[in-house]
Image: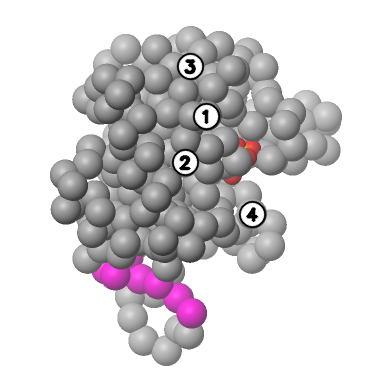
Amino acid sequence: AAARVPIMAGNWKMNLNHQEAVVLVQKLAWTLSDKRHDHAKVEVVVVPPFTDLRSVQTLVDGDRLAVKYAAQDVSVHDSGAYTGEISAGMLAKLGCSYVVVGHSERREYHGETDEVVNAKARKALDAGITPIVCVGEGLEVRQAGEHVAHCLTQVTGSLAGFTAEEVAGLVVAYEPVWAIGTGEVATPEDAQEVCAAIRVGIREQHGDAAADAVRIQYGGSVKAGNVAGIMAKDDVDGCLVGGASLQVDEFSGICRFY
Ligand code: PEP
């Protein structure tokens, strides 16, 4: 993992209004600067709700904060009669560096398939935004021992048709659904097993350069107290953090895992 810059992304989900968002990002930036966090060494990304993005943009730009920000979802459409949807072009205009696509909560509650996730990631790339493509198995798949095959199928479908250069630049997040929001973190060995398999799969389908460069995150009940063991694994290049990203001390501790 040495050549890949680790990336810690905090997915706030449907929490915090735009005023609370500004307070949290300010506190996070101050805390990281107090801890002399080196943003070139570990990239820090917050993932607020859509309604907070403009406030976060103004704060980050105005105060020249090194924190980056992402959206939690993006439309498969460019514009038009799609009530409630947000396009990749709109997110690019707001300065989003990343967008999360295919989070398990989108797959589960909104029926998102790998085909939809693929289309969303395509729109993000076309708009100059880096997708964070989420995959992961549920408990039944894990208990049946089919977690690796399941995740590889999701990766193949979600990255279909992308060039090697595009795959090299994006982020894949491995998030076992049974570990999300449950307090049940995967062991570092569990995380490494699937992240390594994903890299092998990408090597076979997209070549060495893509496999060596693509960053693969682990997500699922990551906290300041368990992050070091997970990050010590060769094929884990960062974490996608839910609950703990709403607490400044926890998230800054995760960003300062080294
Ligand atoms: C997530 O939502 O991506 C996540 C990993 O949540 P948590 O850290 O709360 O398990």
Residue type indicated by callout 1: Glu
Residue wearing tag 4: 105
Is 88 one of the magenta-colored residues? Answer: yes
Q: Quadrant of residue 193?
A: top right
In the image, 16 versus 200, the foreground residue is 16
Q: Tell me, for residue 231, which label it has, or none.
A: 3
Query: From the image, which quarter does the N terminus lie in?
Result: top left
Say if disc 4 is inside 8 Å of ligand 1.
Answer: yes
Please state the horizontal and vertical placement of residue 216, each as a whole percent of the image.
44, 29
Q: Is residue 176 above or below residue 195?
A: below
Residue drawn at (59%, 18%), measured in percent from left and top? 226
Q: Answer whether labels 3 and 2 touch (C-beta < 8 Å).
A: no
Element on which disc 1 rests: helix
Residue wearing tag 1: 250
Q: Residues within 10 Å of mark 1 (few under 14, many from 20)?
A: some
Q: Residues within 10 Å of mark 3 (few under 14, many from 20)?
A: many
User: Real-space Cα distance between discs 1 and 4?
Assistant: 23 Å
Residue drawn at (27%, 68%), measured in percent from left and top? 89
Work out whether mark 3 precedes mark 2 in sequence or the reverse, and give the earlier one.
2
Q: Residues in magenta?
A: 84-91
Residue wearing tag 2: 10
Left or right: 65 as drawn, with respect to 231: left
Residue drawn at (64%, 32%), measured in percent from left and top? 221
Query: From the image, which quarter does the C terminus lie in?
Result: top left
Q: Tell me, for residue 204, which label it has, or none.
A: none
Element on which disc 4 rests: helix
Q: Is residue 165 above or below residue 96?
A: above
Residue type indicated by callout 3: Met
Element on which disc 2 rests: strand
